[in-house]
Amino acid sequence: MPGGWKLLLSAESTGRLGALLTMIVVLGCLAIFSSSARALDKSVETYPDLADRLEAQRQQRIREKAQNRKKPATNTKAEAKPAKETPLEPPELDDRLNPLPTEEKKKEPKPDENATGVVNISILDENGPVAGRVIIKDIKGKTYGALPGLKGAWIDGSQAFRLPVGVYNVDVTCGKHRLPWGGVIKSEKDAETRTIVQTGSYGLDTIKGWRQFDPYVNTNTKSEMSNLYSFRTLGEFGIAARAEGIEVVGVDGAWGMFDSRGVIFSESRTDKRDLSLAFAQETRDRYLPLFSWTESGEGNLYALSTSPVLPVKNKGREHFETYAAVRDRGGIAILSNPGGKVIKLSSGVAGGVAGHLLFDVNAGIMPDAFDVSGGGFNLDLWYFMLNLGYRITALAGGPDARGDEAMDIPSLSSYLYLPENKLTPAKTLDAIREGRVIVSNGPFIDFSIDGCKPGGVTHPSRDPKAVFVNVLSGIERTDSIAEVELVYNGKVVKKWKGGKLQKSLAMRHVQAFTDVGWAIARYRSMNSDYWAFTNPIYFTTNGYTPPEPIMARINISLHDALAGKALAGTVKVYNLGVCIETIEVGAEGGTIEVPPTARLVVACEGYDNLDFNVYADGGARAMLDSLAKENKLRPALLNEAAYGKMRELLRNIEFKAGMVRAARK
């Protein structure tokens, strides 16, 4: 080593030497950096595309940093030296496909599915126990209907029955004028749970004097709900009726209720006396049953009667003969769904018993009531008949009210005005004939004009009359009053508006009724499922009478069917099965007048007798058949000219009787 270096490394100069070396290193680095910068600047000027690449690299680094910030923290050491992947050995693969058995979890013991508990439900109002309809559903929505100790869905005040252990939703109703109840009950194993249902009245003071009424209930209807709506005795049926708030009902199928052999009671058996006694017992038990049956072969006619006698079915008889048979037994003939479909007759295609109205009004053989449950055309036809001057009571219920497969008992069809405390069958039928009826499926209308109620008669006058209307909606939450209308001779003359959630409305009004005719009050709900209207209050003069029936005028002549020779003979006139007159007819013929419902038996000596049915052979049935074939029957029933044509036809019947010689014995 040179001597100069020894001097620099001497102990005395160590501090100065360190500083000097540091300075030299720094200056060298600066020189190198300056040279690199000049070279870089020169390259940028010479190669401009490099700047683009550098900027792209810078932007890429910015994006990578941003992405790394979003990623979760990882083990950088592990990433730096990833573990080598090695293939799975066969034992490891087997373990994945068929894992080794693990310790089984302890299973909870299954509940006893056959365990039951006793549930006791009591229904009370302010006066004590009342009958009610009980619907029980489990948490899955399954309805329990046919339970041991609970026949159907109705109980009389209180009932205890068994249910599988669990929690149930319960809905209880007690007719249309008691508040419904809903709650939860629990059935516990081998225990008894008591539930008290408290219900209150809803509008009972408003409907005082009016009895809820269903004219036709078929207790033998077969349907998927038959387990709910079948009854072993008339007493059980009575409980169901009271639970629905119905005090008067027409019972069809009652003849089979008391015959263990399944044989229907008929006129030829004395068992009808036992059935009458059973009905009498129910009358004493706050429930009035009438006998109801479907009579017409077309299925559009049913009847109400106080007698359990079942009439002979309509075989070979005309519809007006059925009307007469019902009245002879003290009953009421009801035309169900009169504006319904055209029904084929055994003799042709005429429109069932409804289609016969063109003939009936002229013949004077009319039903006592229309069942207008279907609404629509039924109501139009009823209004039309009222405008013609006929008085026909409107009812609702019957076999067409809720379809072929439905039962009638869980419903309300009409209100009947029977202010007397004691119900009797005779007074009930009189009230129906007189039209003291409100047609409704829940809502109620109290309607009067100068104190006259539906079915009553007053006089037309230019002086205003006091109109009172008090309406009450149905108990259902979805039913509220939309409007109330006063209808006079088919036209709305006054309208009152309701509102959402409005459940009652009382109106006072003065109105002049100057013309002969009728007036009703009509209820419209916010929900179209609910409706009600009254039967008419009639306005008549002292000399006014309903349209008189006509007599059929027949131009008759008798002759030999082969020779054409004119004959003389006799004509026996039978009306509704009774011979009412014998008429002599000369060889020159003549004109006779007989009821349109008559049947003529013509006799000439030496010839076979000849029958002539005025309705079937005089052209009336042919006219109805023609209208039905042309699909003009429904319009014809609302056309006064069509009734006039029927009258004209019946007044000009040509009957040329061709007599056939009797065979010699």
Image: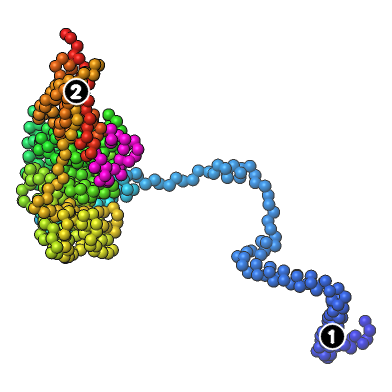
Rendering coords of residue 426 (x, y %): 7, 43
Q: Check disc 1 and report the residue beneath it.
A: 27
Identify the amino acid type marked 1.
Leu
Q: Check disc 2 and report the residue beneath it.
A: 558
- The disc, 2 or 1, on the residue closer to the chain's N-terminal end is 1
CB under 8 Å between discs 2 and 1 = no
Snapshot quadrant of residue 612: top left
Rendering coords of residue 501 (x, y %): 26, 63
Residue 237 drawn above or below residue 73: above
Image quadrant for the N terminus? Answer: bottom right
Rendering coords of residue 81 (x, y %): 70, 60
**Does dot 1 land on a helix, a strand or a loop?**
helix
Asked whether 92 falls inside the magenta stretch, the response is no
Residue 121 is labelled as none
Asked whether 634 falls inside the magenta stretch, the response is yes
Q: In the rendered structure, which segment of residues is drawn in magenta?
A: 622-646
Q: Residue at x 23, y 54 (%)?
A: 490
Residue 379 placement, left or right of 2: left
